[in-house]
Amino acid sequence: MNLDSELFNYLATHQNGSDDPDRIPPLGDLSVEMGVSVPKLREQLGAARALGFVEVRPRTGIRRKPYTFAPAVTSSLLYAVARDRVRFAEFSDLRIRLETAYWCEAVSALTSEDIAELTVLAEAAWAKLNGSPITIPHAEHRRLHLLIFSRLDNPFVTGLLEAYWTAYEAVELNSYADLAYLREVWTYHERIVRAIAAGNPEASLAAFVEHTNLLRHRSA
């Protein structure tokens, strides 16, 4: 496969034979090796960093990173939402359908440590909601949902879900909510976690599907 960017093509196909296979030579060396000007490679490097393909640090230089879909889809989604907020509702619907389709597979892959963390997250959320002052448990909300799908070996599914939660913050759904709404949300989350802990992915899915109707009404 021949990619449009010379640097992208190099990153995708080049295998460094050294003990550090993800280390990428300096741009000057690549320019000579590839026959591409340094300014052009620098421009392509900027795009590669934005897409999460590489990282650049003063001491370690350029390094190829493990593939993740999140940076590319997040940038596109945030742009779409900035132009028209209705795009978030459309993406939210996609997220719900995606989670529903992968739910039982994802839950079945969770470890006992993951399930214990889900329980802790639910408890921490209730502590915030019952505290004085009351605090919105957004970090727990995001972590709980992403943790449920964290064992899926599919970077496209997890990347789309990570992008959703970044956009969720961007449209400020995490900044304010009626307390009664939040309590209802976390009652569903508690049901979900208990069903997962009981080894009943189907019951947890049923609770999740009920829970998603709350967000549909809120973001409409």
Image (tube, rainbow, N blue to C red):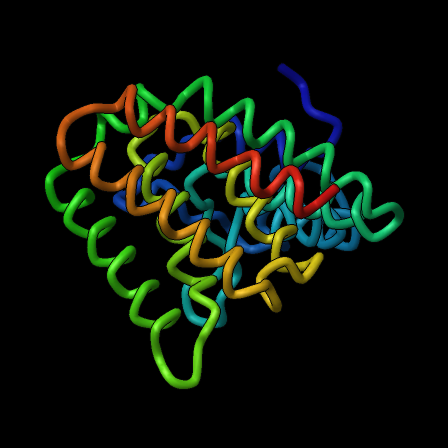
Up/down of 19 relative to 179, above or below: above
User: Residue sitting at 51 percent across and 65 percent down?
Assistant: 179
Position of the N terminus, as image quadrant, is: top right
Q: Is residue 107 left or right of residue 144?
A: left
**Residue 18 falls in which quadrant of the image?**
top left
Residue ranking furthest to the bottom: 132
User: Residue sitting at 29 percent across and 19 percent down?
Assistant: 202
Up/down of 208 relative to 122, above or below: above
User: Residue sitting at 36 percent across and 25 percent down?
Assistant: 205
Return the x and y of residue 47 as percentages of the image width and height.
70, 48
- Disc tally is 0
Residue ranking furthest to the right: 83
Return the x and y of residue 129 as percentages of the image width and height.
39, 69
Residue ranking furthest to the top: 1
Position of the C terminus, as image quadrant, is: top right
Up/down of 9 relative to 211, above or below: above
User: Residue sitting at 33 percent across and 38 percent down?
Assistant: 148
Return the x and y of residue 39 as percentages of the image width and height.
78, 54
Return the x and y of residue 152 as percentages of the image width and height.
34, 28
Q: Toward the viewer: 142 or 150? A: 142
**Residue 160 falls in which quadrant of the image?**
top right
Q: Toward the viewer: 206 or 78? A: 206
Q: Is residue 183 left or right of residue 115?
A: right
Q: Toward the viewer: 43 or 212? A: 212
